[in-house]
Image: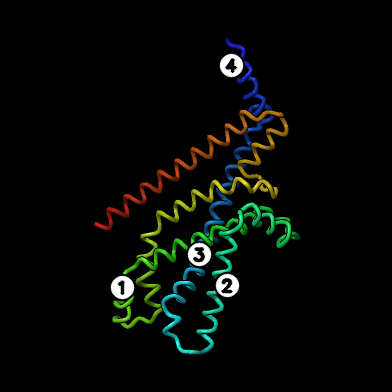
Amino acid sequence: MPEWFTKLTRDFNTAFVVDNRWKYLLEGVENTLILTFFALILGVALGIIIAAIRVTYDKQYHLMKRGISKFLLCIGNIIAKVYLTIIRGTPAMVQILIIFFIIMASSSNKMLCGIIAFGINSGAYVAEIIRGGIMSIDEGQTEAGRSLGFNYVQTMIFIILPQTFKSILPALANEFIVLLKETAIAGYVGVTDLTRGANIIRGITYQSFWPLLAIAAVYLVMVMFFTWLVGILERRLRKNER
């Protein structure tokens, strides 16, 4: 048997089999999926709020009479714009470090810090996805809601938003995939994600080839799987539109 093959086999055994070191990767996959899932939920919630404020300002501000409601909407729009500018204009790495070491420095729950950091980051991009979806809905839909006796809020909830989410579901699913890969930096604040699991193995064995190759393969498989699911979702949505 070739010497190089024997060495690769021995290194593989040292990296994953000895002391069940493969469990570090298994724990990393679990934490990565948990972190991604809950961060996306938080991101969607923030995105809906920010998008609602921005769309309401664009469509209703000039129609509103002077008063506290118009003033609050103006303030909310300013806050939303500042949030979008800061989050989309700074690296996710810097954001998670600020949240972990400054804003939530007293918290020992690293997973929670990661969820909040990535949720806030994702919320900015989800907000623009949702806002773009709402703005793409024909204005006649809003007029149809008004003709049925709905006010602005009811029209948004019962007519506009259902159509919006149907059109942006593929984009939201792609945001989940992007977020899944972005969580690779969570290990910098101590979250045992997939990348940190590989780094732990590297620190124990002083080997880089197998641990890094393994996490690259795992990320690729997960992304391919979720991409496949997104493809199924898009095909079903196209069928429903016929």
The tally of labels here is 4
Q: Nearer the viewer, mark 1 or mark 2?
A: 2
Depth check: give the residue in front, 144 or 86: 86
N-terminal label among 2 and 3: 3
Q: Is residue 46 left or right of residue 173?
A: right
Residue neighbourhood size for the residue with mark 2, other residues' Cα within 10 Å, grouped as few (<14), some (14–19), many (≥20):
some
Identify the element where label 2 is drawn. helix
Q: Residue at x 63, y 47 (%)?
A: 185
Say which label, 1 or 4, has the lower sequence index: 4
Disc marking residue 113? none
Gap in Å between the C-alphas at discs 1 and 2? Answer: 28 Å
Q: Secondary structure at mark 1?
A: helix
Residue 31 higher or lower than 121, as above or below? above
| Quarter of the image with the N terminus in it | top right
Q: Which residue is mark 4?
A: 5
Residue 192 appears left or right of 80: right
Percent position of residue 44, x then y: 50, 62
Mark 3 Cα within 10 Å, few/some/many (few <14, many 20+)? many
Q: Circle 1 is placed at which residue position?
A: 141
Indicate which disc, 3 or 1, sits on the residue closer to the N terminus: 3
Against 214, residue 118 (above or below) is: below
Mark 1 surroundings: few (<14), some (14-19) or many (≥20) residues within 10 A = some
Q: Name the N-terminal-most of marks 3 and 4.
A: 4
What residue is shown with label 2?
79
Vertical side of 112 occupied by 219: above or below: above
Instruction: State which tag comes first along the sequence, 1 or 2.
Output: 2
What residue appears at the point 68 percent right and 53 percent down from the top-left corner? 110
Kindly identify which residue carries mark 3: 47
